[in-house]
């Protein structure tokens, strides 16, 4: 489908210029309720002796180790909110046992615990008395949020995120306000996408035929022997009993006939070419709207489509000796077979042909519409056209009703005459040149490029004092909540509660969180939060060396990703403990992944929950191949990457960046291949490197039984693998099971780290020292409830950083 904008768009944009003023992006907030009172500061009057006895020896004005001096840091800071960032660093390093360094005199455990408690109480008490939610930045919707908002606003089952530029990331996430810039190029793309979306939603798209192509995920040619084929059901969207092929979502613009074509593999040495002899087509009628289009073959109980194990070489190319047989290939729409085509089991090409792989589909094309019968009824048209004027004089009133309804949902608040006037001007301009429906379409497109829709802005009431703190209105809170849990706009239920001032009544927020997490739209937390927190988005970019890992293929990569996605979704949906991320006794597998793990009793392509034997060497995130793969290189593991991943994502204890000109690891010494442990032992001889590696390496060494694609192994470089490790405090452990025990002893630190990452995502900004008291409060509540994940989420949506706003002044 083309992306050309409607001819009247320039006039639409001019009419919308009044909308762009920042002062009018959101309606005026309701009356601000008073903030809750806080408990008195409980910080003692005297600074604990541990500071002078242990800390000030290095962190003073003379030595200033790590560029930190505590000479000017006094107990009074905790009473006056001074140097809070320094105190938070001191608290974190002392709690983790990193300070004082192990080679320096140490306080007794009781003295350390007392100091940590003193400091934590003082910081938390000041934060309770002086809540500071941090700087609020006007935030643009990122491309995923924009696509989801379009989907939910217009009931349009089309993903337009790939038609917008990729967003920058900050603090590990791509929804961070400070990095979501706006450029002329980006606005051009918004305009183009709005035009396309507006036409699709209203059903007023061009009637000309065009082709939509979908390349089925397959592996590349294997040693010039053609493209590997699926000999099993390739997608849950395909009929049961099928094999091979693929399926994708296609949006039919009209009730019409469409041509569905499949490009088949030919087992030649270059299947990037598309030969017309390998194309098969059939025409089927489709109703307007979204459909899942699939092509697949039928799986037989005993398939006679043999797969050669002999590969081609430079001396010989095996060719078929038996004539091809005809195979039924099914065309399915929304999972139902609608037609079948007989295709030959192979085609003799002038280049040559083989039978290395069964016949399969490499690409699906859908062309059309042919002989369109009309726009047809779609969920989008039902959502938009709330009324149908019977006469010309009623058109303006009907259009205003339509525009007001859409603008209210798009802007996430009640709309006023000042909101509707420019939109109705756009409607009137297009109506004068065309007809009622095209006028509505133009207004829809204008809504989709309005700053009210594109930006999340919280407007302070007139007369607000700069630097003050106020509670968010219900409408502002509804938007924060929906973009946190759904990456989309509030639905009608949430919006109505906000409009009627009920959202912040006792129990209502918690009930909404429970309802929203049970909704399919909560999958956004898995895709967008977990996908970035766990680096799952990097899995598609991993390219394991097929000479080292010949069994790695597209099916295995897909199963790896699905395991972790389903695992996170299950923990979220069933409100499991956060500790399942460390040591769950279950996971999600299909046959392909179970075989990779060496786990028996799992058959078929469907992913399902599987209980794990303690001897399986799996369980939790660190036993999952997706995590082990994204923390490796293409041809070998990385102790450092894995150790750093654990520190970054599970303990929020990131090591400092490496010094410049770090030498590469030596993989050989005296002509002998070195194990990962031996390589790092040589590397750590440099004092500049040792300080960081002493924390990372033990964690990474414990995972060395897993190769670069997560398979279990006993040897590396021909030598038995040593997975024993020693923590900086002297604690010894070995392997994944030992690592789990280490992490479970730090479950409070893990819960805090998880909360910190999730709060960063929820606030769309980096977490600062002022946010740490709220994180500790949430962590204590979670610990009292068995570390349940929904307790953490509810703690976030009730926290001061989430519910309060620092005013900028008016």
Image (cartoon, rainbow, N blue to C red):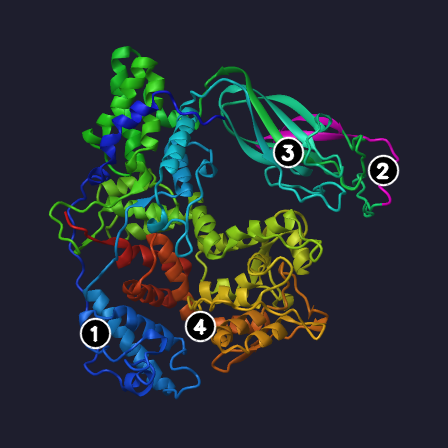
Q: What residue is drawn where x is 55% and y is 63%? A: 622
Q: Earlier in the sequence, mark 3 or mark 2?
A: 2
Q: In the rendered image, which residue does mark 4 sit on?
A: 746
Disc on res. 363:
3
Indicate whether 8 appears above or below 506: above
Q: Nearer the viewer, residue 51 or 657?
A: 657
Which label is found at residue 77? 1
Q: First in sequence, mark 4 or 1: give its number.
A: 1
Q: Is residue 712 rendered to the left or right of residue 64? A: right
Q: Residues within 10 Å of mark 1 (few under 14, many from 20)?
A: some
262 or 791: nearer the eye? 262
Asked whether the residues under the numbered discs 2 and 1 touch, taking CB atoms below 8 Å apart as contact, a structural biologist would say no
Q: Are marks 4 and 3 in contact (CB under 8 Å)?
A: no
Spot occupied by residue 452 in the image (x, y as percentages of width and height): 28, 37
Q: Which residue matches tag 2?
A: 319
Looking at the image, the residue that sits furthest to the front is 661
Residue span colored magenta: 315-343
Q: Is residue 803 left or right of residue 235?
A: left
């Amino acid at each position: 489908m083309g992306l050309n904008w409607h001819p009247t768009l320039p006039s639409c944009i001019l009419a919308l210029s009044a909308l762009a003023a920042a002062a009018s992006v959101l309606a005026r907030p309701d009356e601000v309720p008073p903030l809750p009172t806080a408990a008195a500061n409980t910080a003692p009057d005297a600074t604990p002796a541990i500071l002078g006895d242990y800390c000030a020896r290095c962190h003073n004005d003379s030595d200033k180790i790590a560029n930190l001096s505590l000479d000017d840091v006094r107990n009074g800071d905790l009473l006056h909110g001074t140097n809070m960032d320094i105190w938070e660093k001191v608290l974190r390093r002392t709690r983790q046992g990193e300070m004082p360094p192990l080679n320096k005199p140490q306080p007794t455990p009781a003295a350390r615990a007392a100091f940590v408690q003193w400091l934590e109480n003082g910081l938390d008490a000041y934060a309770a008395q002086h809540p500071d939610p941090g700087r609020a930045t006007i935030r643009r919707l990122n491309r995923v949020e924009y696509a989801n908002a379009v989907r939910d606003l217009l009931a349009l089952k089309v993903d337009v995120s790939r038609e917008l530029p990729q967003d920058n990331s900050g603090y590990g996430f791509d929804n961070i306000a400070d990095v979501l810039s706006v450029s002329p190029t980006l606005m051009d793309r918004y305009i183009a996408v709005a035009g396309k979306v507006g036409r699709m939603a209203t059903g007023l798209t061009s009637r000309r035929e065009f082709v939509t192509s979908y390349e089925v995920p397959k592996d590349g040619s294997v040693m010039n022997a053609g493209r590997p084929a699926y000999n099993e059901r390739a997608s849950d969207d395909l009929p049961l009993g099928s094999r091979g092929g693929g399926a994708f979502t296609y949006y039919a613009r009209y009730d019409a006939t469409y041509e569905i074509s499949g490009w088949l593999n030919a087992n030649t040495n270059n299947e990037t070419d598309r030969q017309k002899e390998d194309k098969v087509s059939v025409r089927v009628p489709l109703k307007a709207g979204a459909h899942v289009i699939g092509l697949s073959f039928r799986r037989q109980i005993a398939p006679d489509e043999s797969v050669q194990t002999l590969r081609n070489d430079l001396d010989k190319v095996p060719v078929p000796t038996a004539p091809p047989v005809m195979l039924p290939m099914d065309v399915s729409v929304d999972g139902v077979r609608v037609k079948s085509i007989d295709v030959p089991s192979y085609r003799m090409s002038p280049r040559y042909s083989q039978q290395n792989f069964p016949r399969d589909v490499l690409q699906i094309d859908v062309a059309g519409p042919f002989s369109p019968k009309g726009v047809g009824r779609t969920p989008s048209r039902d959502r938009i056209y709330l009324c149908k004027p019977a006469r010309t004089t009623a058109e303006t009133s009907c259009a205003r009703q339509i525009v007001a309804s859409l603008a209210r949902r798009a802007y996430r608040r009640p709309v006023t005459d000042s909101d509707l006037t420019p939109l109705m001007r756009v409607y009137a301009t297009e109506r004068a040149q065309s007809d009622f429906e095209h006028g509505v379409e133009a207004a829809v497109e204008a809504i989709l490029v309005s700053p009210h829709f594109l930006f999340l802005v919280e407007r302070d009431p007139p007369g607000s004092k700069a630097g003050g703190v106020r509670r968010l209105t219900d409408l502002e809170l509804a938007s924060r909540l929906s973009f946190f849990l759904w990456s989309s706009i509030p639905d009608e239920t949430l919006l109505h509660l906000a409009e009627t001032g009920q959202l912040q009544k006792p129990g209502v927020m918690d009930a909404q969180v429970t309802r929203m997490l049970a909704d399919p739209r909560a999958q956004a937390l898995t895709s967008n939060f977990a996908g970035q927190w766990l680096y799952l988005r990097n899995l598609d970019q991993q390219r394991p060396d097929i000479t080292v890992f010949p069994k790695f293929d597209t099916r295995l990569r897909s199963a790896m990703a699905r395991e972790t996605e389903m695992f996170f979704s299950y923990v979220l949906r069933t409100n499991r403990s956060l500790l399942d991320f460390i040591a769950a006794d279950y996971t999600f597998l299909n046959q392909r992944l179970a075989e990779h793990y060496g786990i028996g009793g799992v058959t078929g392509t469907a992913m399902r929950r599987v209980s794990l034997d303690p001897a399986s060497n799996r369980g939790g995130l660190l036993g999952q191949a997706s995590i082990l793969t994204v923390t490796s290189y293409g041809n070998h593991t990385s102790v450092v990457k894995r150790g750093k991943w654990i520190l970054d994502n599970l303990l929020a204890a990131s090591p400092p960046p490496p010094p410049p000109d770090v030498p590469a690891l030596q993989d050989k010494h005296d002509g002998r291949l070195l194990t990962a442990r031996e390589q790092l032992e040589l590397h750590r001889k440099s004092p500049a490197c040792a300080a960081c590696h002493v924390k990372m390496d033990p964690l990474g060494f414990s995972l060395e039984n897993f190769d670069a694609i997560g398979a279990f192994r006993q040897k590396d470089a021909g030598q038995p693998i040593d997975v024993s490790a020693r923590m900086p405090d002297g604690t010894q452990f070995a392997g994944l099971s030992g690592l789990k025990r280490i992490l479970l002893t730090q479950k409070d630190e893990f819960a805090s780290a998880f909360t910190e990452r999730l709060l960063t995502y929820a606030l769309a900004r980096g977490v600062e020292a002022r946010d740490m008291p709220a994180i500790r409060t949430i962590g204590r509540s979670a610990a009292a409830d068995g570390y349940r994940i929904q307790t953490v989420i509810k703690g976030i949506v009730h926290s001061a950083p989430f519910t309060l706003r620092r005013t900028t002044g008016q």
